[in-house]
Image (cartoon, rainbow, N blue to C red):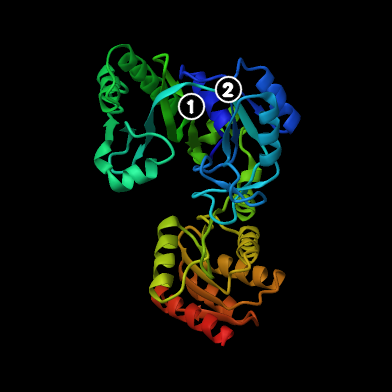
């Protein structure tokens, strides 16, 4: 689960991170009012969407020469003009894709005299299972280019969970940022506060870009992107309430209501599988056979008729889907129950695209019999390779 920048900053401030003053705004008048509560004379008007690259982004509805989704303002009139430009319009960034995201919220912050910008992030290192720091002296809007062209400028180290964050970790962050004296101490404190926040909130990522050194010699968190482990949100009701459903894909949101793990992709073969590993293998073999998966969809180990029907509806709500491959291994879940669900779902949604089903496991023969006697044009498959070949052939035949 992701949250907006202003929410992330409010959260990190509770753990001691140094944050510039700022206020959220949902209307143009609220934006002007928020700026009026700040000392000025420099204000920053920031679009709030769940995507990076806002500063270099472009609004679909504005001219190509228009400024991006993060703008400086030197008066309340400029704040009003920028807010009017942004709110309700679609911001396209390197991370949103061509569709972009509509801006419904703004964050009005106090300006800062920046002497240097750094990059500081915490994430879970899957190789070690530890929280890792990613640090660079080259912060700002071009961090992706830094990672690509000069990776030696990015330093990474992880923290042993048995000891937790120690003073030497703070010194490592300061050294990587090439800071000394009081500024090194400030950087170490920021690192400690972020680690504490990461652990306490079950975060999956905390990215500060930029972490700024001001002309006054202060270290300041100027931007923050924070994501959380969705499976841990039952422990953090306060954080779960920060979820902005308007930022989420409608199909992914609908899937979450049925406890389905769904991610929309760019292909044309819809997939319904039980188990994340099996789902990944299914997507790989579809691509191996010359087509592309339209989604990742894991119905889990306890799928029933309702979940299967919901999964079919979600898959078919994607107009790009030209066929569906169902790949189920019935361990805890019985194949005959799944077959009943598939038949009922196909009839309910009036399935019009090719459907290939591969079943294996408990009561597999009963499941195959149910599919064969359904009266529906369901193509059975013997194994995963057979299933992939058949769904590609069926889709190509339907398109001919």
Residue 136 is drawn in which quadrant? top left
The spot of residue 12 in percent (x, y) is 49, 23
Residue at image position (60%, 59%) is 304
What label does residue 324 carry, if any? none
Measuring from the top left, give residue 154's x and y in whole percent.
Answer: 29, 37
The answer to whether residue 135 is visible is yes
What residue is at 70 percent from the left and 28 percent from the top?
77
Left or right: 242 as drawn, with respect to 294: right
Residue wearing tag 1: 222
Within 10 Å of the Cα at label 2, are there few (<14), some (14-19), or many (20+) other Cα atoms?
some
| Secondary structure under the numbered disc 2 in the rendered image | loop
In percent of width and height, residue 385 lies at: 39, 76
Name the foreground residue: 11 vs 202.
Answer: 11
Using the rendered view, name the quadrant where residue 321 is placed. Answer: bottom right
Q: Earlier in the sequence, mark 1 or mark 2?
A: 2
Residue at image mark 2: 42
Where's residue 252, x and y in %? Answer: 59, 52
Number of the front mark, 1 or 2: 2
In the image, is 384 to the left or to the right of 31? left
Distance between mark 1 and mark 2 Cα atoms? 14 Å
Residue 334: tell me if it is visible: no
Contact (Cβ within 8 Å) of mark 1 with mark 2: no
Residue at the spot 75% in from the left edge and 28% down from the top edge: 29
- Would you say 273 lies left or right of 23 here? left
Tell me: 254 left or right of 368: right
Q: Which residue corresponds to the image point at 66% horizontal and 74% vertical from the top-left?
A: 351
Q: Is residue 361 above or below residue 251?
A: below
């Amino acid at each position: 689960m992701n949250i907006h920048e202003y929410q992330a900053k409010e959260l990190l401030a509770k753990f001691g991170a140094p944050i510039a003053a700022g206020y959220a705004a949902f209307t143009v008048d609220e934006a002007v009012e928020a700026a009026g509560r700040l000392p000025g004379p420099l204000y920053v008007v920031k679009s709030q969407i769940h995507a990076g690259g806002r500063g270099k982004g472009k609004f679909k509805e504005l001219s190509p020469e228009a400024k991006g989704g993060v703008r400086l303002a030197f008066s309340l009139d400029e704040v009003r003009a920028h807010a009017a430009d942004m709110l309700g319009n679609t911001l396209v960034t390197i991370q949103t894709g061509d569709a972009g995201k509509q801006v419904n919220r703004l964050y009005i912050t106090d300006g800062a005299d920046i002497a240097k910008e750094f990059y500081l992030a915490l994430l879970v290192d899957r190789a070690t299972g530890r929280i890792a720091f990613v640090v660079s002296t080259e912060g700002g809007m071009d961090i992706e280019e830094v990672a690509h062209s000069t990776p030696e400028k990015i330093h990474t180290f992880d923290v042993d969970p048995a000891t937790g964050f120690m003073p030497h970790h703070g010194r490592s962050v300061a050294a990587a940022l090439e800071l000394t004296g009081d500024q090194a101490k400030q950087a170490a404190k920021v690192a400690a506060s972020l680690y504490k926040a990461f652990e306490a909130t079950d975060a999956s990522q905390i990215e500060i870009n930029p972490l700024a050194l001001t002309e006054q010699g202060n270290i300041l968190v100027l931007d923050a992107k924070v994501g959380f482990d969705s499976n841990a949100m039952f422990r953090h009701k306060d954080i779960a309430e920060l979820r902005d459903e308007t930022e989420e894909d409608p199909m992914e949101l609908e899937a979450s209501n049925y406890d389905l793990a769904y991610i929309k992709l760019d292909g044309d073969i819809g997939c319904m599988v039980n188990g994340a590993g099996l789902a990944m293998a299914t997507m790989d073999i579809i691509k191996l056979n010359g087509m592309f998966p339209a989604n990742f969809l894991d119905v889990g180990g306890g799928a029933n008729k309702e979940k299967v029907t919901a999964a079919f509806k979600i898959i078919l709500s994607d107009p790009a889907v030209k066929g569906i491959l169902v790949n189920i291994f019935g361990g805890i879940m019985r194949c005959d129950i799944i077959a009943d669900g598939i038949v009922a779902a196909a009839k309910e949604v009036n399935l019009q695209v090719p459907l290939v089903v591969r079943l294996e496991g408990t009561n597999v023969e009963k499941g195959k019999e149910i599919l064969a006697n359904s009266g529906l044009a369901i193509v059975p498959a013997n194994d995963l390779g057979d299933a992939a070949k058949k769904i590609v052939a069926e889709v190509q035949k339907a398109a001919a």
